[in-house]
Amino acid sequence: MFISKFVVTTAIFLALNIHLCVIGNTSSSHPKGHLQPLGSHQPAEGHVEVLEVIPSPKQFYENYVKASKPVIFKGAAKMSPGFNLWSDDYLRSQYGDVIVRVDYGKKENRERSADPMPLAEFLDLYNSSDRYLVDTLPDQLWKEYNLLPCITCGGFTKGLQDAVLWFSSGGTKSFLHMDTVENINCMMSGTKEWFFVDIRDSHHVELDHKEGDYSSVDVDHVDMYAYPGLQHVPWWSAHLDTGDCMYVPYGWIHQVTSISRNIAVNIWWTPDLEFNDSDCQVAMETGPGVSLDDFQFTPAEQFRFMIIKLIENNGGQVDFKEVQKLLISEHTGTPLMDEEVFSKFDMDGDNYLTVSDLKIVPVKTFHEELEEFETGNISPIRRH
Ligand SMILES: *[C@@H]1O[C@H](CO)[C@@H](O)[C@H](O)[C@H]1NC(C)=O
């Protein structure tokens, strides 16, 4: 009796041990998604909302911009003349001589530089190489690309920064990164897959390259040990079809993969602009066909935004010494403001820059004093 009870206990103990071993093995195996493509760690929270009708500027501002929520505008890119025009033959015959900036490599690498070349030369080689055209949309093509009606008034156009062309034969992969700008991206040809992290979950993602707000994680083989925040990060998926546009809110970390002959154009504008739709009546009467040529781009507004953020993060005011330390060029690492420029921004002359100073600095002053912020120069690195 006693012995048999002992045997049973031992058997249970052994069984438990084996069980514990199995558990032990499981927990020492790798985190889900380790060395797999981004997004393998858990299913997406869902797909970005898709709208069939473009909202009014007010609805767009309230429901998406202010709410920080991405949204897809189904088929909206088809309103731009370029959507039907931009075949290789057309681009070559009309704009073959235009000089464009062409990157090496479809997988993003910010160390490699780009080559300028005529568009015709790029068209000759893009199908049989991994070259990738990333550049401000050449001026000559601005008349063939429309601003979406939801941003043609209400304040959005006061902060237009850049229109950027992304052209390849597909298979491009960006870094996981975020932009400090608002963005609408339109697919003129091909499709794109997006991985998104809500700005409210962005603390999960280690952006180890602070200077460019990107993570150097290999998006094809995610190292879950080097980037442990990615083990459980909630994410959203988005599929952009040919002809679709998408709003990408400021601060949403994302990664983009392109598929097949790919032409996208995106518009960047400065965040935190004051919304006021008093000019929208006029804009509506002009109709939806408004090309980029009809708008003034003021990339320097981004500078106002960045200095305001910097002031807010430093207790509401900064003196010249702090500005020298905090405000440095992303490219050269040198201070952006000398004492003379500082005094031009210090509107009330109290030797401190405050938000109220910055709000009334004329945009002209940013352009004049901070040459880096001329149109085109604002996107010397790939940010998409
Ligand atoms: C490149 O390939 C696309 C199809 O993917 C085709 O439409 C285009 O005409 C090709 N361009 C050249 C220059 O061969």
Image (cartoon, helix red, strand yellow):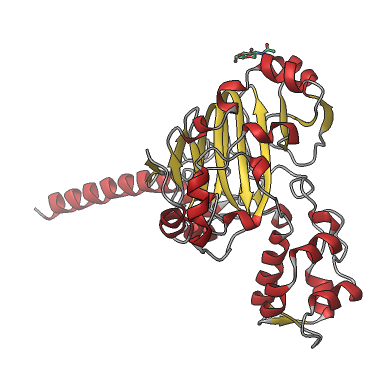
Q: Is residue 252 above or below residue 145?
A: below
What residue sits 55% from the left and 49% below the top? 152
What residue sits 87% from the left and 72% below the top? 341
Q: In this view, does 327 lie above or below 16?
A: below
Residue 53 image offset from top left, x and y in percent: 38, 41
Q: In which quarter of the image is residue 293?
A: top right
**Residue 198 can be seen, yes or no:** no
Q: Which of 331 and 122 is in front in this view?
A: 122
Looking at the rendered image, the quarter that the C terminus falls into is top right
* Label tally: 0
Residue 17 image offset from top left, x and y in percent: 32, 49
Residue 80 image offset from top left, x and y in percent: 56, 32
Q: Left or right: 338 with respect to 323?
A: right
Q: Ligand 1: which quarter?
A: top right
What residue sits 63% from the left and 38% below the top? 174
Q: Which of 41 and 137 is in front in this view?
A: 137
**Residue 99 can be seen, yes or no:** yes
Q: Is residue 73 above or below residue 189?
A: below
Q: Left or right: 257 with respect to 95?
A: left
Q: In which quarter of the image is residue 221?
A: top right
Residue 125 image offset from top left, x and y in percent: 75, 16
Q: Left or right: 118 with respect to 10?
A: right
Q: Left or right: 110 with respect to 292?
A: right
Q: Farthest bottom residue?
A: 350
